[in-house]
Image: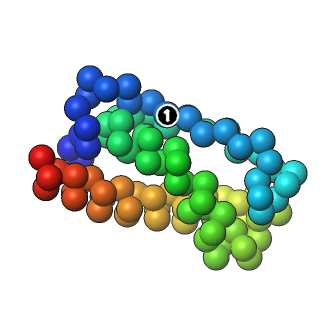
Amino acid sequence: MPYCLPPALPQDAHSIKLSLDEAKDYSWFAVFDGHGGALVSQHSSANVLQKITSSPEWKADHRTPEGIGRAMVKGFLEMDKELREVCFATSLQA
């Protein structure tokens, strides 16, 4: 995948949420490495948690490790699909 932004920009991003709206007793800590460029890590940092917690897998079962795992897989796959679209659109503008 081509870089979405020039590699000279800071490429890592993070996301911290001490209490999730959907599960008050859960916290979220994530670091996103910018191998795909700054746009990828920043967009992921801002959006992947929402993808996870809005998935049908999360709504069905977010109280077991298996349910959380299924929701995370679904959320990250959705994020990957979205990033491919965002990066493709960005590369067309360059």
Is residue 56 depicted above or below 84 in this figure?
below
What residue lies at 47% left-to-right and 48% top-to-bottom?
44
User: Residue 47 location in percent, x, y?
Assistant: 52, 54
Total labels drawn: 1
User: Residue 32 location in percent, x, y?
Assistant: 49, 37
Asked if one can make out residue 26 in the rendered structure from this viewpoint, the answer is yes
Is residue 90 depicted above or below 75 in this figure?
above
Looking at this view, is 32 or 15 the one in front? 15
What residue lies at 30% left-to-right and 57% top-to-bottom?
86
Colour option used: rainbow
Q: Quadrant of residue 24?
A: bottom right
Location of mark 1 (residue): 13
Asked if one can make out residue 66 in the rendered structure from this viewpoint, the answer is no
Judged from the image, the secondary structure of the residue bearing numbered disc 1 is: strand
What residue lies at 45% left-to-right and 30% top-to-bottom?
12
Looking at this view, is 58 or 47 the one in front? 47
User: Residue 21 location in percent, x, y?
Assistant: 77, 58
What residue lies at 87% left-to-right and 51% top-to-bottom?
25
Q: Quadrant of residue 82?
A: bottom left
In the rendered view, does 44 fall on the left or right side of 84? Answer: right
User: Residue 5 location in percent, x, y?
Assistant: 25, 38
In the rendered view, does 16 fall on the left or right side of 47? Answer: right
In the rendered view, does 33 fall on the left or right side of 56? Answer: left
In the rendered view, does 90 fall on the left or right side of 66? Answer: left
Amino acid type at mark 1: Ala
Tell me if mark 1 has few (under 14), some (14-19) or many (20+) residues whose alpha carbon lies within 10 angstroms of its own. Answer: some
